[in-house]
Amino acid sequence: MTEIGLFLVLFAALFVGWVMGRKNSTKKAKQPKKNIPNDYFRGLNHLLNDQHSEAIDAFVDSLEINSDTFDIHLTLGNLFRKKGEIQKAINIHQSLLARPEISQREMRMVQLELASDFMSAGLLDRAGRLLLNMASTSHKTEFQPKILGLLVDLYEFEQSWDKAIQIGTELVKETSAKKDIKRLAHFHCEVAQEFQKKEQLNPAFEHYKSALGVDPSCVRASIGAADVLGSQRRYRDAIKELKHAAEQDPEFISIIIPKLKECYQKIWGSGGYIKFLQEQNQQKPSTALIMALVQHYLEADKDYAEMFLIEQLRLHPTIKGFKELINLQLADSDGYNQQHLVVLFELIDQLIQAKHKYQCRQCGFPGHQLHWQCPSCKSWGMVKPIHGLEGE
Ligand SMILES: [Zn+2]
């Protein structure tokens, strides 16, 4: 929100707050009549002089905390946090907490906002202590999912995966929300990857299985489990996992194919592998599948491979496919034709290298690497290979 936008919201909120306070005071006939506070005029003066920050401070000072203005104070604090003025947000929320008249429910609302303030300010220990204290005393209240959600955010930020799994499991029991289930599965995958790096394959496999237990659609867990099985030379089981991954999300086929090819080569040769590619290409064609098939056909019959590629390009034109076609034509050409084709091949290759391979389906963040957690919007499992003319 811009400074002026924030200011307008504040101005409206404070005016409403003052009117409500005044209305309230007129109901109580014996109480002295409330006048507009001096701070309010001070705020107006700052506003007229284009001193927006000072105006906001003055308006905040002018607003008396009572049951009518509680929500306004809460909103003001949140606005300051969103605007990046964390200390002001903390001050407002702490001054609310210090009020003896606020109810238990209101106190929890403020504590939740204060925990968010601490997290935004990087005061993770304070946020953690506050939230854990709340979690232990707020069982079976409406706030428990929000408290657990913030704790999971905190542990995710700290990459404390074991704690994130523990609290994430509690959260999923509370909410059964798809987003919470999805990220809990990825927490298991993170732990699995750490074990994999240390070559502790059994616990790594167990965590991938736990991830699939939480979220059966977690393609990362199936690919990870297949990698572990491959390292254990259990190629048949790895193939099953990889085929399952292709069913879970065909968009990851370009990552699955090379792994699958390697496993098949270790045991059965290429028969089952080609059958799988052909079936997949009929159901959901992609450049990765077409290229893998072309590579296979080339071993036996170059003309057939070229014919197949041209036919597929007519149906599903892609730049990568076009580059492969030029590559095949190069072998049969000579002289000027060959020189021209080499230039064209190199240009297309540069074009492909410059293009991003992956993109977040949530926020559009592009990248050359696959991130299981989007570096931009932080959502899990939303960065996927790019498809279409310029992609797979
Ligand atoms: Zn994103």
Image: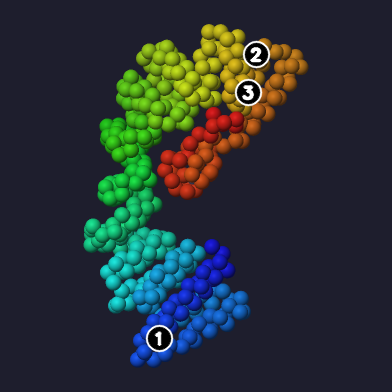
The quarter holding residue 76 reads bottom left
Q: Which residue is mark 1?
A: 26
Image point (45%, 15%), residue name:
274
Relative horizontal placement of residue 95, taking residue 139 as reference (left or right): right
Q: CA distance from mark 2 to mark 1?
A: 93 Å
Which disc, if any, is residue 331?
A: 2
Q: Is residue 307 above or below residue 130?
A: above
Would you say the residues marked 2 and 3 are in contact, meaning their CB atoms lie under 8 Å apart?
no
Which disc, if any, is residue 330?
A: none
User: 193 or 322: nearer the eye?
Assistant: 322
Relative horizontal placement of residue 370, taking residue 126 as reference (left or right): right
Q: Earlier in the sequence, mark 2 or mark 1?
A: 1
Q: Secondary structure at mark 2?
A: helix
Q: Amino acid at mark 1?
A: Thr
Q: Position of residue 115 (x, y in %)?
A: 36, 63
Q: Earlier in the sequence, mark 3 or mark 1?
A: 1
Image point (31%, 58%), residue name:
147
Which disc, if any, is residue 322?
A: 3
The N terminus: image quadrant: bottom right
Q: Secondary structure at mark 1?
A: helix
Q: Earlier in the sequence, mark 2 or mark 3?
A: 3
Quick check: can you spot residue 111? no
Foreground disc of the pair 2, 1: 1
Would you say the residues marked 2 and 1 are in contact, meaning their CB atoms lie under 8 Å apart?
no
Q: Position of residue 243 (x, y in %)?
A: 38, 24
